[in-house]
């Protein structure tokens, strides 16, 4: 639920979403390996984040007391940045047609 919306707004009530998240990294490709770095590292880092979020009441998670998808994208960035060198963008899709991009600024 979003605690700061006007009284009576539908998002002020408990509700849920099936978010989809895209993680992008940038940097120099290792010529020998042919990749920037092992994508399994991104998978490991995102798995930890997903475990913190999946089937949880987001308002109870520190830093997500107002769990807009804008705030969620920043929260995910802060969790992943130390583990994903070259992180350049986190995109959170709230629905099939609505998303928010965060690039660390």
Image (cartoon, rainbow, N blue to C red):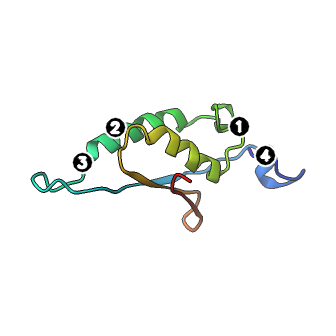
State the residue position of label 1: 65
Quadrant in which the C terminus is drawn: bottom right
Q: Earlier in the sequence, mark 4 or mark 2?
A: 4
- CA gap between label 1 and label 2 equals 25 Å
Q: Secondary structure at mark 2?
A: helix
Asked if the residue at tag 1 contacts the one at tag 3, i.e. Cβ–Cβ closer than 8 Å, the answer is no
**Total count of labels:** 4
Closer to the camera: disc 2 or disc 3? Answer: 3
Q: Earlier in the sequence, mark 1 or mark 2?
A: 2
- CA gap between label 4 and label 3 equals 42 Å
- Residue 34 in which image quadrant: bottom left
Q: Residue at x 65, y 39 (%)?
A: 64
- CA gap between label 2 and label 3 equals 13 Å
- CA gap between label 4 and label 1 equals 14 Å
Mark 4 Cα-neighbour bin, 10 Å: few <14, some 14–19, many ≥20? few
Q: Earlier in the sequence, mark 4 or mark 1?
A: 4
Closer to the camera: disc 3 or disc 1? Answer: 3
Q: Earlier in the sequence, mark 2 or mark 3?
A: 3
State the residue position of label 3: 37
Q: Residue at x 34, y 37 (%)?
A: 44
State the residue position of label 2: 44
Closer to the camera: disc 4 or disc 3? Answer: 3
Asked if the residue at tag 2 contacts the one at tag 4, i.e. Cβ–Cβ closer than 8 Å, the answer is no
State the residue position of label 4: 13
Compared with 96, 72 (above or below) is: above
Closer to the camera: disc 4 or disc 2? Answer: 2
Q: Secondary structure at mark 1?
A: loop
Q: Position of residue 81 (x, y in %)?
A: 44, 42
**In the depicted view, which residue is nearer to us: 49 or 78?**
78
Asked if the residue at tag 3 contacts the one at tag 2, i.e. Cβ–Cβ closer than 8 Å, the answer is no
Compared with 26, 72 (above or below) is: above
Say whether residue 51 is left or right of residue 44: right
């Amino acid at each position: 639920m979003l605690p700061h919306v006007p009284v009576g707004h539908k998002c002020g009530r408990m509700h849920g979403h099936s978010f989809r998240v895209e993680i992008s990294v940038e940097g120099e490709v290792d010529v020998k390996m042919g990749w920037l770095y092992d994508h399994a590292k991104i998978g490991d880092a995102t798995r930890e984040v997903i475990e913190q979020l999946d089937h949880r009441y987001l308002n109870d998670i520190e830093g997500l007391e107002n769990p807009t998808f804008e705030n969620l994208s920043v929260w995910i960035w802060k969790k992943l940045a130390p583990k994903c060198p070259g992180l350049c963008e986190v995109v959170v899709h709230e629905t099939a047609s609505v998303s928010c991009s965060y690039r660390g600024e």
